Amino acid sequence: MAASRGARPHVLIVDDNEDNRDVLQMRFEAAGYVALCASDGEEALTLVAASAPDVILLDVMMPRLDGFEVARRIKNDSTLPFIPIIMQTALDSVERKIEGLRAGADDYVTKPVNFEELEARVRSMLRIKALQDEVQRRESELERANAALLQLAVSDALTGLDNRRRVDERLREMFEHSVRLREPLALAMFDLDHFKNVNDRFGHRCGDAMLREIGLVLQSSMREIDQVGRYGGEEFLVLLPGAVSEAAVTFADRARLRVAAHRFTFEGHELHATVSCGVAAWPHQQLVNRDALLQAADDALYVAKRLGRNRVVRFASAEFNANFRDFHDQHGSGAAAGGTTAVG
């Protein structure tokens, strides 16, 4: 019912006196308004809920529900836009006017109503409403713009997943939660095998498309509470709150198999891809903080790549311990369990 720019304003007349309603409806219609009527407060609330008018002319003294209560309910309804309310009463007392204004009335007229004065007040209220509507529109646009900027700040531009900054923030939050409640937390770090070959042979557009699809496959393999983000060029990190190492390995291997079974198509070419994955879980006596947990997943990924790719390796497993020690001796040490960096 709310009038758009250039449309006829809608006035809701609420009065239990039929003669009053008829006269005001006729006068407002003749003056170019759309005038609707309600005979009591309950009917008025029903009409307002169905379609908000531009202004309400509200009688105070009515059966069942008086004007004060109607005004209070309308002004307290957060689902409604700003609707100016002009109260009218035959009791011209300061106390009644104060009560009406406290209930939410925006203006007051005294019966018998002078129509020229009433219409002038209606036009004034409509100008105020137009300004209020414009303010609300701009605030909504600003909120949407801020939300979009926030999304850009925490999202990876290529895949739409969380970016590294956001993944690190989520990891910090989850690790602090796990320490506080002594709940397990696992990480699965995936790396696309031989990704450089894809870019070299088919171009970066193909590589970008493949990374986007890898992200979707990982998402489809996760639980609702898990989080995934693009952590590096072709690296993805999945955070698995509440998961012990065995459950994390089960998830990682399921995701690995789904990637291997997925058919990537690009400009008429069908491509196949595999991923390697390193898994680490807390609590673990060797992992004293979240940086150590992250490094452990990276070290396990390094071993998975060195053992031939397309596999999952768990930090501190027999397979990890048997192979990482050799790689550690050959390539040096780092933070958590050797600190080596996964290779493509």
Image: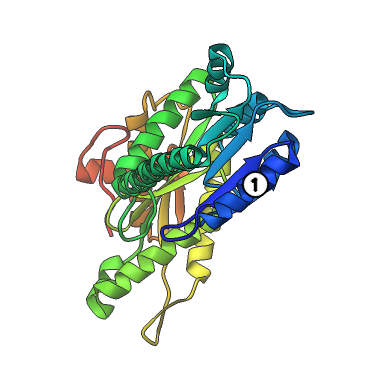
Label 1 residue SS: helix
Question: Closest to the observer: 323 or 213?
Answer: 213
Which residue is nearer to you in this view: 179 or 131? 131
Front residue of 110 and 244: 110
Residue sitting farthest toward the right: 64
Name the kind of residue labelled 1 in the image.
Val
Name the side, left or right, on which 33 lies relative to 334.
right
User: Which residue is drawn at the image coordinates 30% and 66% (left, top)?
Assistant: 195
Position above or below: 53 against 109: below
Q: Residue at x 52, y 46 (%)?
A: 54
Q: Position of residue 130 (x, y in %)?
A: 40, 46
Please say whether residue 166 is visible from this viewpoint.
Answer: yes
Residue 263 position (above or below residue 277): below
Residue shown at 23%/36% (left/top)?
333
Instruction: Read off the residue under disc 1.
Output: 23
Other residues around mark 1 within 10 Å, as few (<14) / some (14–19) / many (≥20): few
